[in-house]
Image (cartoon, rainbow, N blue to C red):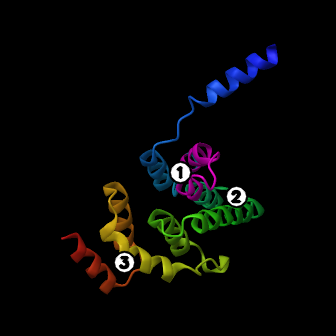
Amino acid sequence: MKAIVFIILYFGFLGFIQEPAISEIRDLHEKAVEQEEAAEKLMELVEPYNVEKPVLMGYRGAGHMLMAKHVGNPFSKMSHFKKGKNILTDAIEEAPENVELRFLRFTVQSEAPSFLGYKDNLEEDKTILLNTIQDVKDDELKKMITGYLLSSQAISNAEKRKLKNLQE
């Protein structure tokens, strides 16, 4: 009898768990670049998500890669980075047309140190971002991508001018 009550309560409680707001996830991702606490909170919020929610899964991967920046132990750094890379890759394989996932990978690859050898998709993702940014309906996402691209050293001045022209 106790087991049945427990099961009902457990599954009833799961019904109250809500998916985190994407704006909160994006904000934590941005802060996680500099703040370990934000990286930890980001990973905590998106930990349960997998291929059913590829964008949240992508942020989980990005969160691990950002945690690599905050841990001191070189083995932990590499472990977080590799785990995050695999998760983000899986998310992109699940939703290859998702511009937000391409943006996440582009930001990581453009900022990753060369010795990690994680720059394989930089040009591909940049092309996708530049060619699809005008079609992004989510204003928050569009602003986030545009702001990053305009400040990125991985984008040429000519590409930045083209991007600025699209904004006008």
Q: Quadrant of the C terminus?
A: bottom left
Q: Is residue 1 above or below residue 44?
A: above
Q: Quadrant of residue 108?
A: bottom right
Identified at 62% across, 49% down, the residue is 49
Disc number placed over residue 137 in the picture, else none: none
Alpha-carbon span between mark 2 and mark 3? 38 Å
Q: Amino acid at mark 1?
A: Gln
Alpha-carbon span between mark 1 and mark 3? 32 Å
Decide which of tag 1 and tag 3 comes sooner along the chain.
1
Q: Amino acid at mark 3?
A: Asn
Q: Nearer the viewer, residue 100 or 27?
A: 100
Relative horizontal placement of residue 132, taking residue 45 as reference (left or right):
left
Q: Nearer the viewer, residue 167 or 50?
A: 50
User: Within the magenta stretch, is there residue 52?
Assistant: yes
Q: Position of residue 50 (x, y in %)?
A: 64, 53
Residue position for label 1: 35
Q: Is residue 43 above or below residue 113?
A: above
Task: Farthest residue to the left: give it.
Answer: 168
Residue position for label 2: 72
Task: Farthest residue to the top: give it.
Answer: 1
Asked whether disc 1 touches disc 3, contact meaning CB atoms under 8 Å apart, the reply is: no
Q: Which mark lies nearer to you, 2 or 3?
A: 3
Q: Is residue 10 above or below residue 22?
A: above
Instruction: Tell me the SS state at disc 2.
Output: loop
Magenta extent:
38-58
Identified at 60% across, 54% down, the residue is 60
Q: Position of residue 132 (x, y in %)?
A: 36, 73
Residue position for label 3: 131
| Residue 154 appears anywhere in the view | no
